Amino acid sequence: MTQISRYFQFNLLTKRNRITMKFLGLVLTVTFFAVIINAPRVARPFQTLEELYSSLDSLEIWPEVFKLRESAEYVYSGREISQEEYVQNLTRFNRSNQPKTIVCHDLKGGYLEDRFIDGSSASDSYGFYHWSIIDIFIYFSHYLVTIPPYGWIQSAHKHGVKVLGTVMTEWTEGEEVWSQILSSIEETEKFAGALILLAKHFNFEGWLLNIENDINPDDIDQLKYFVQYLTDGIHSEIDDAEIIWYDNFFDFADGIFVNYNWTDTGLLSSRSIAERENRALDIYVGIDVWGRGCPGGGGFNSKEAVEIIREYNLSVAIFASSWTYENFKGQTFELLEDIFWAQLTPYMYIHVPIYDNEVFSTSFSHGFGEKYFYSGDDETTTSAFYNLALQEPQISVPNYQLQFTFVNIPEDKEDREEDEELLEEEVPIYKFETPFHRIQTQGSNIIIEKKPDQQINSIQYFNKYSYNGGGCIKINVARPQYYRLFLMHLKHNTDVQIIIIHRSDKKNYIQDNYRTNYPVVVVKNNSTTKYLDPYENFQLNSQWVQSCYFSTNMETINELGVIFTTIGSYYLGMIQIYPLPKNFE
Ligand SMILES: *[C@@H]1O[C@H](CO)[C@@H](O)[C@H](O)[C@H]1NC(C)=O
Ligand SMILES: *[C@@H]1O[C@H](CO)[C@@H](O)[C@H](O)[C@H]1NC(C)=O
Ligand SMILES: *[C@@H]1O[C@H](CO)[C@@H](O)[C@H](O)[C@H]1NC(C)=O
Ligand SMILES: *[C@@H]1O[C@H](CO)[C@@H](O)[C@H](O)[C@H]1NC(C)=O
Ligand SMILES: *[C@@H]1O[C@H](CO)[C@@H](O)[C@H](O)[C@H]1NC(C)=O
Ligand SMILES: *[C@@H]1O[C@H](CO)[C@@H](O)[C@H](O)[C@H]1NC(C)=O
């Protein structure tokens, strides 16, 4: 359009000016295309059917996506993990008989800093890393077709979590969209085909379908045909595909997401209907962390709703857990996120990633941070970064030590309504305590007070040091204890070498010739526990030490953790497990 109107303007000018202007136009055009070429690659949604169909031949190419990591057939119970008493042998539960968990991302319409395929420098953006306790991640927004950005797919897949995009229609516009899609078999199959193509092209597992508008009653049969066609089609094209309907069409899809305003009787009846087909676990009961219509009012008290849902042995869909970020404007986000999930962990199931004769390696990085460190070197750090695709495997045991020891919620305010008109003094005050903090929230205000140093053991993410990426794991040892880090199913045909890169604030840590301060590595399979001392230690650049361990004769490693036998603060920068060449001496 602008090109054409500029052309017409040129013709009104004198010949000389025309030449100058043409030259200027050329410069502008060249600049315009140069900007396009250099423009960062971004994920974007489709707003109309026309936009969708006209883009299918020229979809952007993203960097390679990890294949969804396989998980073991068994899961561990979050309740057992978060018990105060240490459980030596964790019970294995058959994964296909346990309730599942969806997290539905919903942050200011999505496509914020996370839309950049190659990352951004906004390190204070929202990220997620509690992958071990969720099964499906949905990227949600109010566009017609929402494509999950690259970083989300990459970090979820690394941890064995499926990713879904969203199809959403609302209002009369939505009615029109569906009357076009359902107008003929060809149109219906065209739309379903486009959705399958998008999931295949961008490497995610399927779709949440959210129709909020009315559908012409004459089209209902055609809509059923659409759901069936899409579900069958995507399963034949994509391993582990998943189609979830919001409040509808359970019979044809893989699962259903039940509206937030459920009641106990509602849950019971949904359950008994689904049980007839042995599909109770495919009902995901919605809870809204902003508190709309949920028992307990959501927020840090979301546990109350989750507890009820799990009493009925149903799956749960947690909507907008980015509340921990958005409500508090991103301040102390990682701590608030850890506190939020610590309350829910007892109701979650930890799925177990399979490593089949592969190297396991992690620097623990969340994929964002104030600095990116290379090989632990403070000299070669770069500035702030945000790139979830760079997230490294996260510890599989959530920070359950942050479970509340005290909760005070004003009685009558439990069912928090969306009433923004409240006077400030009427906004209820919630009080919580963890073993480490006193917390008071009032609306979007939060005060976190650290309890005086209590000499308690703790393990947390720490972003001031890092070996690679933006953070590391900090372990405070007040009394020696085993720290469980990874639950895994690592199969190997040979012996393995384990490398741990660590540091401490202790004096002379690096020169520690007696090694009494260095980590003991604990590896377990389902019948044996081994305690490994390093056979070799050496100093790396800056303050980090590398220790090497052998583990022999264990055909599987199911669990890996560390013990520090002297009190102090320690930092884990990296853990790697390498299969050794056969006959390695
Ligand atoms: C897990 O449960 C499913 C469904 O009940 C069953 O088919 C499968 O054999 C079980 N797996 C194991 C390892 O027991
Ligand atoms: C939940 O909300 C939906 C639509 O907003 C309404 O139709 C339904 O009756 C509500 N259910 C309950 C149990 O309040
Ligand atoms: C949920 O499952 C547990 C253990 O399998 C069982 O004891 C309990 O009765 C179930 N609850 C319901 C409401 O089905
Ligand atoms: C231990 O692992 C082996 C190999 O995976 C399996 O055959 C065996 O059943 C497991 N034993 C227990 C008690 O889980
Ligand atoms: C854990 O399992 C192993 C092997 O099955 C067994 O020898 C040991 O006694 C168990 N430990 C506990 C505390 O149950
Ligand atoms: C567990 O480790 C023991 C001791 O190294 C070994 O004998 C056994 O075969 C291993 N079992 C599995 C299932 O990995």
Image (spheres, rainbow, N blue to C red):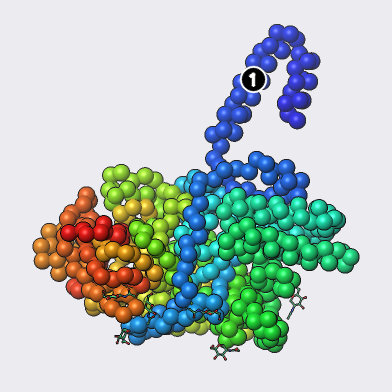
Q: Which residue is drawn at 26% across and 64% down?
A: 495
Q: Residue at x 42, y 66 (%)?
A: 354
* Residue 410 image position (x, y, % from top left): 57, 83
On screen, residue 379 above or below 177: above
- Is 556 in front, or is 373? 556
On screen, residue 382 above or below 367: above
Q: Name the residue under label 1.
A: 26
Taking 364 as reference, is 277 left or right? Answer: right
Q: Can residue 358 be seen in this view?
A: yes
Q: Quadrant of the N terminus?
A: top right
Residue 288, quarter of picture: bottom right
Residue extending farthest top: 16
Q: In which quarter of the image is the C terminus?
A: bottom left
Secondary structure at badge 1 equals helix
On screen, residue 502 above or below 3: below
* Residue 111 image position (x, y, % from top left): 59, 52
- Is 203 in front, or is 332? 203
Q: Which residue is drawn at 51% across and 72% down?
A: 441
Q: Does the residue labelled 1 lie within 8 Å of ligand 2?
A: no
* Residue 245 image position (x, y, % from top left): 69, 68
Q: Is residue 82 visible?
A: no
Q: Which amino acid does label 1 sit on?
A: Leu
Taking 455 as reference, is 230 left or right? Answer: right
Residue 353, quarter of picture: bottom left
Crowdedness of circle 1 by 10 Å Cα count: few (<14), some, many (20+)?
A: few
Q: Which residue is drawn at 53% across and 56% down?
A: 153
